[in-house]
Amino acid sequence: MTRMKLDKFCLVAAIAALLALIFPLSGMDSETGKQIAFVGDIPGLAIAMALCVIAGAAFTWLGVRSINGGFVILAIAVFGCWQATSVLYDHGVAGHAGLGFWLFILSLWAFVWRGIDVIANFHSLDRSKQHAANLIVPVAFGVWLLFVWEVVVSGFGVPQVLLPPPSMIGERFVNSTDILAADFHQTFVKAVLSGYVMGCGSAFIIAIAVDRVPFLKRGLLPLGNMVSALPIIGVAPIMVMWFGFDWQSKAAVIVIMTFFPMLVNTVTGLNAAGKLEKDLMATYASSYWSTLFRLRLPAAMPFVFNALKINSTLALIGAIVAEFFGTPIVGMGFRISTEVGRMNIDMVWAEIALAALAGTAFYGAVAYIERKATSWHPSFRVRRH
Amino acid sequence: MTLKTVVNNVAEMPTSKKAVVDINKLSLTFQTADGPVYALSDVDLTIEEGDFVSFIGPSGCGKTTLLRVIADLEQATGGEISINGVTPHEAREKRAYGYVFQAPALLPWRSIERNVTLPLEIMEISKEERVKRAQEALKLVELNGFEKKFPWQLSGGMQQRASIARALSFDADLLLMDEPFGALDEIVRDHLNEQLLKLWARTNKTVAFVTHSIPEAVYLSSKIVVMSPRPGRIIDVIETDFPKDRSLDIRETPEFLEVAHRVREGLRAGHSNDE
């Protein structure tokens, strides 16, 4: 008889869920001295735990062979997560979670890990299926992290000032969309976009000039290096004094931050065209501008996009930090600094979430344009015959 | 078939045809940190209209440098050179030649068609004319149907053919080729050699062709220039008169082997000089 290979993650899940049924779900209430919740009183949770035991045991023997098995496991884990959160809030386990509860979370962790693992290793020639699988993995992983955050913060009763649970941040986010929209408009649409365009645009043009005029390369590049090394904390108040409280001063800070990465990358990119290609253009007696537009700038594009991507995140950081040093009563940085003072930590987190969303979307948009514009580059090539 | 050979006195040869490239006592010295490098020394050569001239020799013999001097990509430090009666610089400004490099040097962001139309675009020729000429050039190298492909989607041999089409697109009378098939395998190379010969017979262009393959040089050329290194110089010029529409089979004939032998002798003599 051949020895069967046991699926270790499913084994852990089954055992942990079994123990979760035995060990107490929650600690004692300090006032009444009674245990707050029993698994036996909560049929939903009991079913979820039982399911984990059965599925865990079954998959331990069978192994998670196909992607369908992965989805079954994930579905059970989702059901378990739903029951666990409802126990936290509807049955008063929040702040008193006991060993049984954490064992159940451990069981869910093992299931999610195994499920994501199976889907991440999925390979299909069908493009849409592959895309779906590629999308599910990060989404499932992100949702799981949020769940762990929620459960740990609520289960241990962490004070909200230290770290609010994501559900609270989400609630605050949804309930204050008007404030967030105004802050977004002020900080992102006005300051970040204009500063980004001005900073990257001017650096691009000056890079071409630097490339054309040798003495600028020796004189201007070290100067640009120095400007980029200036601490933003020191520059921001000065820019506020120069350009006033409104978005213009933030845009100026962003220009200073984004200028140098763009300058250096573009200058490097302009030298990326090979000697052979330059000789080729010479045999056609191509003029400087003709060679610039037909050969050197296209060859520089991967470098230019690198800088654009770096700068997309730098710009948002610059605008938010600059708003700490004077701003009209709107803006993401302004909101963060005042709400911290008022102990409204959930609002601070809502702004952080907004910044993360905006920054990711901005970066994603630049990366998407890069993919379209430099589809010829070896890193993006798709073989089409 | 007869075999005419002229050694070191090509300039004095009686010529009926027009000289496309006229080189007189040409020399080129590179100044390096380790002292001067004599890339070319005392080179005399005439390339006539309709000639297919091969330059052959070991690496470092200056054959590529000589081609680059003709193309004005390198400047001679002594002697005289004229292309169609003018300086190489003026000839380059007039787009007198098409140059095919060792590597295809196709721009990866342009489709094959737009790579072929690149020189026409620089010469500010109208769009319809550009497309028409690209079609013709691609047909000459048997690449019609691949216009919309990108260079990296083609094999190495096809890429090199596309680069030849690009050199043909603006219909210069002089074609300069620097080991264009050096990186290709022998079967592809044979095929491209045949195509190149057909092209030469049909268009009556003047071709200067750098190679380090003896059979390739003998098979293709109407004139073989044997060179030797340190300093780079011409040690033998061999004229052949195989018919223009020769086939690959001539490589088995005694005449062919005789010329090949002579080239080999020349290369050997050049080598023994400096060892």
Image: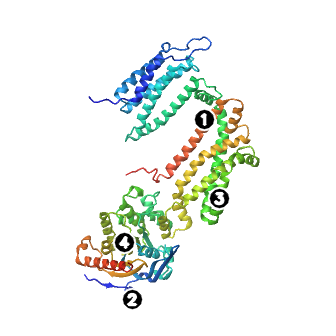
Front disc: 2 or 3: 3
- Separation (CA) of disc 4 from disc 2: 26 Å
Instruction: Answer whether residue B148 is visible to the viewer in this image.
Output: no
Residue, disc 1:
A353
Question: Is there CB contact under 8 Å for labels 1 and 2?
Answer: no
Numbered tag placed on residue A222 in the rendering:
3
Amino acid type, label 3:
Pro
Asked which secondary structure carries label 4, the reply is strand
Instruction: Calculate the distance from the C-alpha at mark 3 to the C-alpha at mark 1.
Output: 37 Å
* Badge 4: residue crowd in 10 Å (few <14, some 14–19, many ≥20): many
Is residue A186 visible in the rendered image? The answer is yes
Q: Nearer the viewer, residue B195 or A334?
A: A334
**Tag 1, which chain?**
A
Q: Position of residue A43 (x, y in %)?
A: 47, 15
Q: Given contact means CB atoms under 8 Å apart, are the residues at marks 2 and 3 in contact?
A: no
* Amino acid type shown at disc 2: Glu
Residue drawn at (30%, 69%) of the image? B194
Q: Earlier in the sequence, mark 3 or mark 1?
A: 3
Q: Residue farthest to the right?
A: A241
